[in-house]
Image: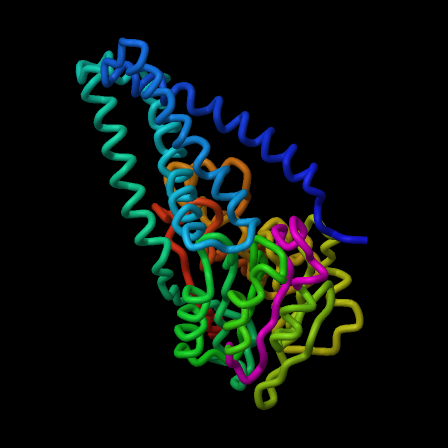
Amino acid sequence: MSDQPSFRQLASRLLIVGGIWTLAHVGVALHVIGLLGLTTGPARALGWSAVLVLAWLPLVALVVGRRPPAPASRVLEWTGFVAMGLSSMLIVFFLVSDVLRVPAWGFGAPRVGFTIIMGSALLTMVGVIKARRPKVVRVAVPIQHLPPDLTGLRIVQLSDLHVGPTIRRRFIQAVVDRTNRLDPDLIAVTGDVADGYVPELRDHVAPLAGLRAPLGTFFVTGNHEYYWDPRGWMRELERLGIDVLSNEHRLLQRGNGRLLLAGVTDLSAASNPHAAMRGAPASDVRVLLAHQPKSAFAAQDAGFDLQLSGHTHGGQFFPFNLLVRLFQPFVAGLHRLEAMWLYVSRGTGYWGPPLRLGAPSEITLIELVPAV
């Protein structure tokens, strides 16, 4: 039986999401029409049409992305997803302005409206540039009783690549080249590799086969693998030479040092840190790869020293990087849970709009150091 949803299911989802998304643009349209003084029938119709085009561009891009490639499809996909980011900021900023009644502060409605429109456009341009340039984040993790042969061990973490409409082979190849230049001992890919099916995106994920680390490259599933074809993506990554960990472990050695590396499936698919430790041999350090940071509580109970996660994107772009803290106990960076460390990557790629604001994308270089 196919894991892929039917055309009818996809169409119904698109109509539901499209309806909600269109309604969210009503407030934007009312502001823009009032701001520009579009009082006549044709002018108002033109204003409403422009806002509806802005609303529906991302949905058109989603449909185009599922059809055979055409010369203009890539341009339309990029335009649609950038429009999604611009729309998100316009909706939020106009809503905040209305709730706080900012025009009543003496700035005047036209000035506030033009500021929101121009500011959103500028932030969108800046966010696109930042999203395409993940930075290297270096993190030292102190480990109790770390043996000399594991001191300085370097783990490069890649997370949330989200290969799809606007993240393609060129971006992934650049990530692979930068990762290899960091000379890692071990590479961890913590889920959400792609947004699409294997036949559509195989060529764009293929550069991951070039990742090089003496102790290996390992992968755990994220929630987005389960939106598409989890078994297909696990098989494809194994074909590329990447070891897939599904509630299981591997014992890795550097000199006399023993590192137990375990990985769990996403929380949406029977994730079990305790099962990943079952039958584990003696080791000096225990590291868990788990897509969602919420796995940390079970991981700490199972006796891990360090968990590497992603999933949150750090909120990805303002103002959602502030709101994500309402839903996630750990958003980004290094955290301590009693005897265990948790590192949450902001993600190497992005999802949806190609934007990064206040939550920069990252290639993470983690180094194990002795605790003082």
Residue shown at 54% from the left, 85% from the top: 214
Give the x, y percent position of residue 250. Answer: 69, 76
Is residue 222 in the magenta section? yes
Is residue 232 in the magenta section? yes
Q: Is residue 358 left or right of residue 335?
A: left
Q: Of residues 322 and 7, which is closer to you in this image?
A: 7
Residue shown at 50% from the left, 66% from the top: 157
Seen in the picture, residue 346 relative to 145 is either above or below; the reply is above
Q: Is residue 341 visible?
A: yes
Give the x, y percent position of residue 264. Answer: 68, 61
**Which of the 4 image quarters holds residue 289?**
bottom right
Q: Is residue 121 left or right of residue 185?
A: left
**Which of the 4 image quarters holds residue 315?**
top left
Residue shown at 41% from the left, 77% from the top: 182
Give the x, y percent position of residue 116. Answer: 27, 28
Residue shown at 63% from the left, 56% from the top: 197
Give the x, y percent position of residue 109. Answer: 23, 16
Seen in the picture, residue 6 relative to 130 is either above or below; the reply is above
In the image, the segment drawn in magenta is 211-233
